[in-house]
Amino acid sequence: MIDVLYFAWVRERIGLPRERVATTAATVAGLVAELSAREDRYALAFSDLTALRVAVDQELTTFDAPLAGVREVAFFPPMTGG
């Protein structure tokens, strides 16, 4: 099981701040594909991956990052300065 966290507009579109997910995906991209296939709200949230960032176990990474041994994946929009 992996804890999946959603922040900002990703959370608003999906309607959850976090959930525990059983996955067979090997990479973050595979997890996104599994989630997107669940319901339209997930498909909408993940429709433009260029508008998203991902962290695996609290470290920024890419969507082709492996999930083996991972405890947490977080999705959020790019951070802006200010």
Image: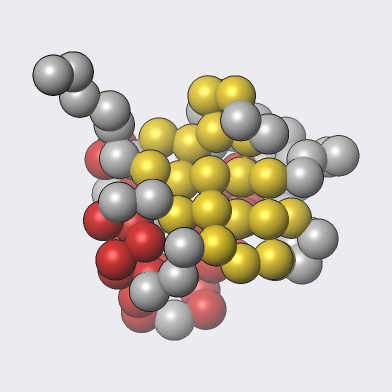
Residue lying farthest to the top in this orientation:
81
In the picture as drawn, the residue positioned furthest to the front comes out as: 82
Q: Report the residue that reaches farthest toward the left.
A: 82
Q: Is residue 16 visible?
A: yes
The residue sitting at 61% across, 67% down in the picture is 19
Q: Which residue is pictured at 38% across the width and 50% down the height?
A: 7
Q: Position of residue 3 (x, y in %)?
A: 68, 55
x and y percentages locating residue 14 in the rendered image = 38, 70
Which quadrant of the structure image shows residue 4? bottom right
Q: Quadrant of the C terminus?
A: top left
Measured as percent of width and height from the top left, residue 20 is found at 69, 66
Residue appearing at x 29%, y 31% in the figure: 78
Given residues 47 and 55, the one toward you in this image is 55
Q: Is residue 82 above or below residue 75?
A: above
Q: Tell me which residue sits at (36%, 79%) in the image.
A: 40
Task: Give residue 16's quadrant in the image.
Answer: bottom left
* For residue 32, side relative to residue 70 (left or right): left
